[in-house]
Image (spheres, rainbow, N blue to C red):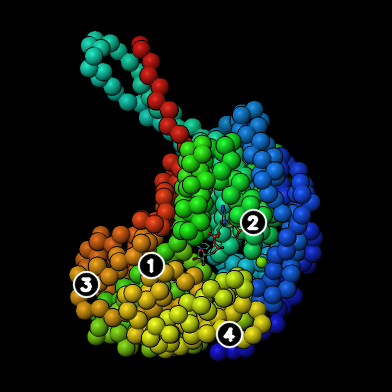
Amino acid sequence: MATVRSIAQPDSRAMDFVSRTHKMLINGQWVEAVSGKTFPTYNPATGEVLSRIAEGDREDIDRAVKSARAAFETGPWSRLTPSERGRLIWKLADLLEQNLEEFAELETLDNGKPFKVARVADVPLAVDLFRYMAGWATKIEGTTIPISVPYAPGAKYLAYTLREPVGVVGQIIPWNFPLLMAAWKLGPALATGCTVVIKPAEQTPLTCIRLGELVQEAGIPDGVVNIVPGYGETAGAALAAHPGVDKIAFTGSTEVGKLILQAAAGNLKKVSLELGGKSPNVVLGDVDVNAAIAGSASAIFFNHGQCCCAGSRLYIEDQIFDRVVEGVAEQAGKIRVGSGMDSTTDMGPLVSEEQLNRVCGYLESGLSDGAKAVVGGSRFGDKGYFVKPTVLVNTNDKMKVVQEEIFGPVVTAIPFKDTEELVTKANDTVYGLAAGIWTRDIQKAHRIASQLRAGTVWINCYNIFDAALPFGGYKQSGWGREMGKDVLELYTEVKAVCAAI
Ligand code: NAP
Ligand code: MG
């Protein structure tokens, strides 16, 4: 494994942006926090402060919600045609694409992920999502419904449904894909005609703030998108509880998801949640072993394991267990860990010191419970928040490393004998976000896919995302689906209209 590299010099536009103190976007104006406070964001490759950001709190959230309400009810946004809305979203996508490199650099500086990944995954996926949602703006339809009304014989009615925007939406997003998670939430809100108050994660606010500048440049009217950076316990909690918010959309930990739900109870706002996971990735004995090894390594190590759908429980059929473990460990050993700005880096630092401590805590707990690290097992270097890609064996179902979401580059490899036992084990979790199956037996693959309690099942692939594919969780992995046609349901109300004719 290579040593931690120093950071290469990013493009001057990204550096200019980073060097500024950032404000929050409320009603089309960049303003300071009411309290005047700011908070720092760090470069996780060095631990140094990158920028300072206005620190939103309850009063800022309140101003932002009022601005979103006015834009929803009386602003120019409420009078735009679906086609006009669609064109504005498309324009936003174009602007994002034009600034792709800068966004990728900002993401790398703030989050730590490799620049080469951010520029082919995070930013293009966000662009694609906006374009996909721009298309939906003109296709959100109700239906006409023939009704019978048994107590009104002979009467005639014309009945139809309208699909209307849910209203003012609060959106709270995480740090693992900061820009992309903002896009997943803003895209459908704009397509359906909602207005938004978005709170980025305290660790990674930069790309969301920069996106706010593009929202203005695209000509999306003032107050439609309000951005209030700040901490979860203050700004986030105030947004989730605000009586003027009609819906809250949250992505993050299951623990905080439950707090969101409680906070939302006050005005019974609609809630959608995209939460954690402990996803099983299953390798059957008949498989193309090399493909399964490469796919299983990337299932866990992509984005440093900081994916809610990371394939963190690797179930391997007995007869090929040793071979697959050896192969995945070999791949892990080849991963070049370093600053995300270095073009040779495959894996950057974890996002924060807190996450470093959390992941290292899990490693210590696993090892002291009797697990063995075939590769990795500890922090990497002593500067920045790097962890060695790790493969654990000799685990049992009771261990924390098998049960809990680690959110780092740590996979537990577990052997199984038959598929019945496998399905029971794979489903033995409070989560149900995703799963992978690697096999040449396509019948068996679809049978197992039907038995797994998960919102996404990948067969002979992993981490394949598309704006048209719904994503979300069974069980405690969440409520509702993002992306695809399904997300429109989260951002609309259905109105039934019945006319006597
Ligand atoms: P988190 O606390 O759930 O953070 C997600 C978002 O929720 C952030 O914007 C956070 O704000 C906000 N938040 C925190 N407490 C809140 C509250 N009481 N009310 C409203 N909003 C609140 O996640 P984390 O602490 O950053 O990471 C911890 C673990 O969560 C990870 O190790 C991982 O297991 C899981 N996680 C899952 C995902 C996912 O995609 N499913 C993403 C990130 C983390 P601040 O960050 O500003 O405090
Ligand atoms: Mg940061």
Q: Nearer the viewer, residue 213 or 383?
A: 383
Q: Amino acid at mark 2?
A: Tyr
Pointer 3 residue:
421
Q: Residue at x 62, y 86 (%)?
A: 381
Mark 1 or mark 3, which has the lower sequence index? 1
Cα separation between marks 3 and 4:
36 Å
Pointer 1 residue:
279
> Which mark's residue is nearer the viewer, 2 or 3?
2
Cα separation between marks 1 and 2:
28 Å
Cα separation between marks 1 and 4:
25 Å
The x and y percentages for residue 310 are 44, 69
Q: Are marks 4 and 2 in contact (CB under 8 Å)?
A: no
Pointer 4 residue:
380
User: Left or right: where does residue 258 sit relative to residue 394?
Assistant: right
Mark 2 or mark 3, which has the lower sequence index? 2
Image mark for residue 231: 2
Secondary structure found at label 3: helix
Secondary structure found at label 1: loop
Query: Dot 3, crowdedness within 10 Å: few (<14), some or many (≥20)?
Result: few
Query: Dot 4, crowdedness within 10 Å: few (<14), some or many (≥20)?
Result: many
User: Left or right: where does residue 169 sit relative to residue 7?
Assistant: left
Mark 4 or mark 2, which has the lower sequence index? 2
Looking at the image, is 69 positioned above or below residue 339? above
